[in-house]
Image (cartoon, helix red, strand yellow):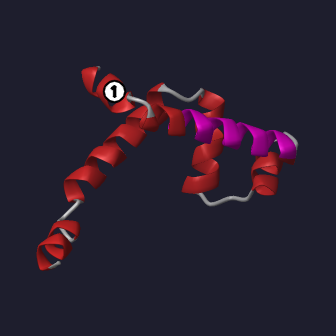
Amino acid sequence: MAAYSRAMAEDNSQQMARLKHNLARALREDVTARQREFLLLYYGEQLNMRQIGERLGVDKSTVSRTIKRGEARLRRCLRYGAEAFLDCR
């Protein structure tokens, strides 16, 4: 049990660094410019969907739909073999 606990507590900083690198790269290369803009406003500047809509002159439902589609693209990219794809570039 002690060996298992030590193995589970290993430093995962390399995995986190690789994930952050691949996420940044996927944001640059895999999502559309509009999705990237909405995602950065939502997660980066922590604006809510109504505030993003007001700032960009679009409906709140458009913001929501665009963010969800961007998240889905990022999720697919990072989940299904994107690491190999992104590391090759």
Is residue 79 among what the camera can see? yes
- Dot 1: within a 10 Å radius of its alpha carbon, few (fewer than 14), some, or many (20 or more) residues? some
Q: Which residues are magenta?
A: 61-74
- Choose top left, top right, bottom left or bottom right for residue 73: top right
Residue 62 sits above or below residue 44 on the image: above
Position of residue 54 measured from the top left corner of the image (x, y, whole percent): 83, 49
Left/right of residue 69 with respect to residue 1 in the rendered view: right
Q: SS class of the residue under badge 1?
A: helix
Left/right of residue 67 with respect to residue 15 in the rendered view: right
Report the magenta stretch's main SS: helix
Is residue 56 among what the camera can see? no
**Residue at 33% of width from left, 32% of height from top?**
83
- Which residue sits furthest top? 89
- Which residue sits furthest front? 1
Query: Which residue is more in the foreground, 62 or 86?
Result: 86
Position of residue 26 measured from the top left corner of the image (x, y, whole percent): 44, 33
Which residue carries the number 1 mark?
A: 86
- Which residue sits furthest left? 3
Position of residue 79 measured from the top left corner of the image (x, y, whole percent): 44, 37
